Image (cartoon, helix red, strand yellow):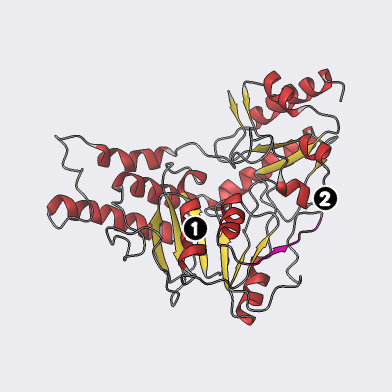
Amino acid sequence: MIYLDYQASTALAPEARDAMLPWLGGPDSAAFGNPHSPHVLGRQAAAAVALARERVAALLPAGGTLIFTGSAVEAINLAMRGSAPLGDKRPLAVSAIEHVAVLETAQALGCPVTTIPVSRDGIAQTDCALAPGTRMIALMQVNNEIGTIQPTIDMARRARDMGALLLVDAVQAAGKMALDEADLIAISAHKIHGPKGIGALWVRDGIALEPILTGGGQEAGIRSGTLSPALCAGFGAAAQVALERRQSDAAHAAELWDLARELFADWTLNGSADARWHGNLNIRRDGLDVARLMSDCRDICFSAGSACSSGSGKVSHVLRAIGLDDKQAKSSIRLGFGRYTTPDEIGEAARKIKAAAAAQGV
């Protein structure tokens, strides 16, 4: 099996697994305490959570508060809902290529929403018109479907000038590059070789959030619920390894990108070739039946779009936003690769995918 779906999830790093194991003990273990309890086992668990928080925070801008959540989706909801006083109907602005967690939450809040357009290269247009009184702008740092790096620094300046908050979905950027300044940043563990079931929201100093989950007062009263020391420890270890290997991982992804681009030279690239994370290759072949392609290449894990929308039958809103029509969007595939991908795997996958496409006559 060849795994080329790094944007959907990544394999658990051995270092993260090792960090988690001590906190998965049974009744004979001394490591199962509630990290919010005052006794010895609780304090030991709390120490593990504190260490993990430091390690994850090292991926983010200096200062601020790191709040552990159950996922990046929860972190995004906490940022968008928790930053608005009850009944606040001031406008929001979101890019046309945001994750559905941002788009659907913006709609659910029931306030006016400005859609920030993107170029055909998949780059948000930071000079677009925004509604007066806009309270929050949401712009992801790296797009999950086409891998394009967004101008979050420019958007942060604009947000400051108009008194708005900037929310950055950094799920695909964390651990891969320095995270740009923002007011609120959402990240996820399982996209950086950590465990599923845990994410985090970074909150700039001076920003007050109202909880959207109540009932325990954990995480400084902002996010109630007992933390899992095992998940926190795994997230922390994965973050530490990602920071240590950031340059080598990026160089490896760039090497694989060059190889993949050469092997798929006769396919059309979706999104910018330069302003992007090079572990994401979104390409299309006119006339390609992607469902048939995936059936014919069952031993290769890749995507027909983002994992959050694949199987829904919907055309990718990201591909539509960059100007593709429905046929072009439906003939696109996403190949994601990274730390544990080998050049041989890229070569074998390309051979099989191209052979299957040729069998369709495209």
Cβ–Cβ under 8 Å for marks 1 and 2: no
Q: CA distance from mark 1 to mark 2?
A: 29 Å
Q: Is residue 178 visible?
A: no
Whether residue 115 sits left or right of residue 119 in the image: it is left
- Residue at point 15% right, 35% down? 27
Q: Which is more toward the observer, 326 or 24?
A: 326
Kind of residue at badge 1: Asn
Span colored in magenta: 112-119
Kind of residue at badge 2: Gly
- Residue at point 76% right, 70% down? 128
The relative height of residue 317 versus residue 17 in the rendered view (above or below) is: below
Q: Quadrant of residue 180?
A: bottom right
Q: Which mark is residue 77?
A: 1
In the rendered image, the quadrant that contains the C terminus is top right
Q: Which is more toward the observer, 86 or 221?
A: 86
Task: Identify the residue position indicated by label 2 in the image.
Answer: 323
Q: Secondary structure at mark 1?
A: helix
Mark 2 burial class by Cα count in 10 Å: few <14, some 14-19, many 20+:
some
- Residue 143 location (% of width, % of height): 65, 52
- Residue at point 33% right, 43% down? 19
- Residue 154 location (% of width, % of height): 68, 71
Residue 160 in the magenta stretch? The answer is: no
- Residue 13 location (% of width, % of height): 44, 39
